[in-house]
Image: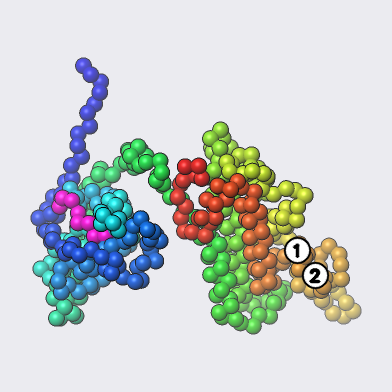
């Protein structure tokens, strides 16, 4: 007897869902670039001579009025667009093609980047179009009313109908979880996608943190308040320095963005000889300075060591690392101490972080220059200038790392360094 087991085709168990909610044929005529709303164009890649984006008319049927857009990730408890698509296809057949890239000469659409949709009648006056957007990167439930003459009544009716529909859809998806198998489906995808196409994308955590730092920093400039810059003395109950908190958060995000950038390089460029798990103390858990020193040894694409220890950038990295460790780990440093100094019949409080001291190990001299490697650790002393120095230092180290790459790798990194996501394609592919 053969030991080979033949897998039976998977079948959905639709129950009463398809009987209760019937599919409606939507308008797919006249696809055109003009059907893409202006505010949505920013979600698409830049067009090229090889393709343009087109879409079918916005409304699924003549006279329909858009009542609302419910992102599937918010509306549904089971958030998996592929599972949702397979379930709907098992009930209603193939979807309608709602838009995508076309060849300007042949007007042929590129299938893998197309948007799909199923228009479903959930009430005699209410339609829900479950569809993808922006080259199938988002999924939404778009609610339409067929009778715009009584808008208030239509909206009230839609609220009840949509809530019941979403509840039943969630229950049906829960019964059909078997339509998606993570391990099998991802392996199948690896085998089907050509080498010239990214098999997956990586969230650009470095860019995300960097942009967050810029946004936080901008907040303090939009709402400038007078800061007293005082350090709490014993017994005081002053309010938290909100601007200091935001500036410290911006500083922290800049620091984390540099570490995320190095982590990204190790993730995408680690040489095949080095197993990521076996070398995790270098690839992901080692000290930041050591991992930067080792980039050229463990990662592809470097023509020289990223930063040499005899350079000014290395000295910048050293004080940046020390500052980062104190901030992120909440280390108690000398400037966090308040010293009691009796003077005649009085008691004075000396705070090294904020009080003038003409030299020595604790206090900061009044003439501290921009070239001084020291930055304050106390939140009340974090200023706009501190954030600027940290940003400049992060930029310097990151740019030095990129400069040490070979030409192909440098061009590849510069192509995504400020983007939201990174294609999992290495420069040689």
What percent of the width, then of the height, locates residue 28?
A: 18, 62
Name the residue tied to disc 1. 374
**Closer to the camera, 247 or 140?**
140
The part of the image, by quadrant, that contains residue 31 is bottom left
How many neighbours does mark 1 have within 10 angstroms: few (below 14), some (14-19), or many (20 or more)? Answer: some
Q: Per the image, is 94 magenta?
A: yes
Q: Per the image, is 8 magenta?
A: no
Residue 423 visible at all: yes
Nearest to N terminus: mark 1 or mark 2: 2
**Which stretch appears magenta?**
91-99
Estimate the spatial distance between the alpha carbons at disc 1 and disc 2, rounded to whole Å: 9 Å
How many neighbours does mark 2 have within 10 angstroms: few (below 14), some (14-19), or many (20 or more)? Answer: few
Name the residue tied to disc 2. 368
Do tag 1 and tag 2 residues touch (Cβ < 8 Å)? yes
Q: Does 27 sit left or right of 213 as displayed?
A: left
Residue 337 visible at all: no
Residue lying at 25% horizontally and 43% vertically, measured from the top left: 178
What percent of the width, then of the height, locates residue 257?
A: 57, 58
Secondary structure of the residue carrying numbered label 2:
loop
**Closer to the camera, 351 or 126?**
126
Q: Is residue 127 above or below residue 238?
A: above
The part of the image, by quadrant, that contains residue 29 is bottom left
Q: Is residue 51 above or below residue 3?
A: below
Q: Does 82 sit left or right of 375 as displayed?
A: left
């Amino acid at each position: 007897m053969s030991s080979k087991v033949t897998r039976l085709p998977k079948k959905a168990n639709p129950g009463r869902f398809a009987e209760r909610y019937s599919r409606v044929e939507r308008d797919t005529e006249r696809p055109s670039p003009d059907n893409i709303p202006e505010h949505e164009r920013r979600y698409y890649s830049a067009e090229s001579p090889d393709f343009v984006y087109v879409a079918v008319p916005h409304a699924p049927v003549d006279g329909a009025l858009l009542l609302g857009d419910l992102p599937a990730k918010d509306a549904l408890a089971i958030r998996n667009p592929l599972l949702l698509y397979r379930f709907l296809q098992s009930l209603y057949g193939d979807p309608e093609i709602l838009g995508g890239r076309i060849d300007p000469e042949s007007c042929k659409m590129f299938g893998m980047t197309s948007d799909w949709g199923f228009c479903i009648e959930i009430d005699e006056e209410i339609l829900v179009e479950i569809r993808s957007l922006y080259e199938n990167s988002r999924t939404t439930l778009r609610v339409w009313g067929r009778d715009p003459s009584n808008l208030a009544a239509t909206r009230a009716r839609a609220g009840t109908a949509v809530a019941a529909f979403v509840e039943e859809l969630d229950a049906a998806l829960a019964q059909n979880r078997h339509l998606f198998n993570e391990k099998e489906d991802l392996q199948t995808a690896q085998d089907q996608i050509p080498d010239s196409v990214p098999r997956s994308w990586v969230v650009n955590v470095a860019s995300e943190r960097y942009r967050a730092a810029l946004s936080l920093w901008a907040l303090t400039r939009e709402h400038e308040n007078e800061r007293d810059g005082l350090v709490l003395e014993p017994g005081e109950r002053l309010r938290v320095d909100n601007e200091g908190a935001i500036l410290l958060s911006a500083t922290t995000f800049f620091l984390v963005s540099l570490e995320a950038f190095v982590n990204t390089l190790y993730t995408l460029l680690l040489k095949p000889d080095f197993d990521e798990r076996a070398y995790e103390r270098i690839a992901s858990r080692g000290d930041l300075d050591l991992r930067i020193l080792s980039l050229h040894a463990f990662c592809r694409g470097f023509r020289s060591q990223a930063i040499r220890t005899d350079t000014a950038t290395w000295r910048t990295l050293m004080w940046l690392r020390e500052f980062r460790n104190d901030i992120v780990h909440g280390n108690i440093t000398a400037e966090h101490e308040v010293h009691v100094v009796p003077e005649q019949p009085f008691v004075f409080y000396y705070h090294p972080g904020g009080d003038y001291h003409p030299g020595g190990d604790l206090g900061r001299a009044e003439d501290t220059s921009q070239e001084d490697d020291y930055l304050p650790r106390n939140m009340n002393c974090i200023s706009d200038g501190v954030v600027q120095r940290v940003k400049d230092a992060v930029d310097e180290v990151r740019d030095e790392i990129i400069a040490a790459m070979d030409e192909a790798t440098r061009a590849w990194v510069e192509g995504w360094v400020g983007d939201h996501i990174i294609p999992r394609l290495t420069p040689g592919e």
